[in-house]
Amino acid sequence: MNGPSAALFADGRLHLQHGPIDLLIEAWGARAEVDAAYRQAVLRFDDILEVLVQELALLRTPLGEATPLLRGPVAKRMLAACWPYRASYITPMAAVAGSVADEILQAMCAGRSLERAYVNNGGDIALHLAQGSALTLGVVNNVANPAIDATVALDASMPVRGLATSGWRGRSQSLGIADAVTVFAADAAAADAAATMIANAIDVEHPAIVRAPARGLRTDSDLGDLLVTVAVGALPASARADALARGCAQAKALQQQGLIYAAYLALQDEVRAILPAAGFTQQAARRTSG
């Protein structure tokens, strides 16, 4: 495997890549502050993957009541994000992308004065918003057809500094049938773990759904022999409604526990939005509140 690489795009974004980790980073502020933040991100990225690999066996082990003895800072972020779900089947790998994004964002913002910044790790995004700043983000229902299906306006007054998306169409395996579940939370790691759980909950039994053992599709899968979704044919309205209702129930429960701020659920041509009481603007061509 080649070592970590860094490249600055013409539009001002920074690209960091090492093995499966692929980050797009952007910051706003005084030029000197942005340049320094980018240097700090590159420096911190240097051993991210190497340290994670050292603890990979533990990170792929399902959580139980005993706390695993993890040492790396990213591994500890993964554990903290997944710990609330230990009564269900979950491994710390459910929060790996968001945890990496959080770690790099923290490093690049340390000691810097930035207006806004984000670290995008394959759609799992850590955010920095200085007081008075805001960002508008696009939500994609289907990664196979990457059109912007909704936009979400976030400002610094909201308790949202991370978002993540999970579903059977994404790069991670899923026990459910959601095209995509996008979660907004206090940080990207928390959003990542919660999106996994909500996407798993969006499920129903139907002949149009094809499943296979996770390990048979990917030998290093942390889901072992659990059946994961590999295809979802056209579903009747009743099946879509049942599956989405289960996802909404899970999302609302997590919202009530303070684990997430909001969620956006998509299955074929239907979406549901679990919104907070106030302070959140979401626009979509097709939306039904859950």
Image (tube, rainbow, N blue to C red):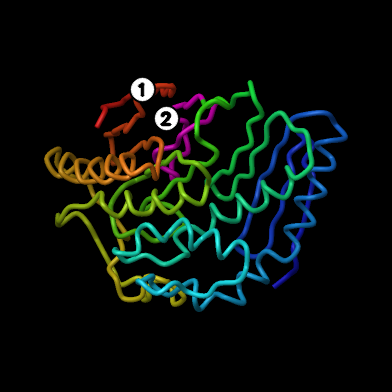
The amino acid pointed to by label 1 is: Ala
Residue 247, given in percent of the width and then of the height, sits at 26, 45
Residue 106, given in percent of the width and then of the height, sits at 68, 48
For marks 2 and 1, the one nearer the N-term is 2
The amino acid pointed to by label 2 is: Asp
Residue situated in front as seen by the camera: 30 or 22: 30
In the image, residue 269 sits, relative to residue 79, either above or below, namely above
Q: Which mark is residue 149?
A: 2
Q: Residue at x 61, y 74 (%)?
A: 53
Q: Residue at x 37, y 37 (%)?
A: 263
Asked whether 142 falls inside the magenta stretch, the response is yes
Q: Which mark is residue 285?
A: 1
Residue 149, given in percent of the width and then of the height, sits at 42, 30
Give the left or right position of residue 33, taking residue 20 as reference.
Answer: right
- The part of the chain drawn in magenta is 136-153
In the image, residue 44 sits, relative to residue 132, either above or below, namely below
- Residue neighbourhood size for the residue with mark 1, other residues' Cα within 10 Å, grouped as few (<14), some (14–19), many (≥20): few
User: Separation of disc 2 and disc 1 at Cα?
Assistant: 7 Å
Q: Are marks 2 and 1 in contact (CB under 8 Å)?
A: yes
Q: Which mark is residue 199?
A: none
Quadrant containing the C terminus in the rendered view: top left
Q: Which quadrant of the figure has residue 50?
A: bottom right
Quadrant containing the N terminus in the rendered view: bottom right
Residue situated in front as seen by the camera: 114 or 240: 114
In the image, residue 263 sits, relative to residue 83, either above or below, namely above
Q: Residue at x 44, y 59 (%)?
A: 172
Residue 22, given in percent of the width and then of the height, sits at 63, 54
Q: Which quadrant of the figure has residue 20?
A: bottom right
Look at the numbered disc 1 and give the secondary structure of its residue: loop
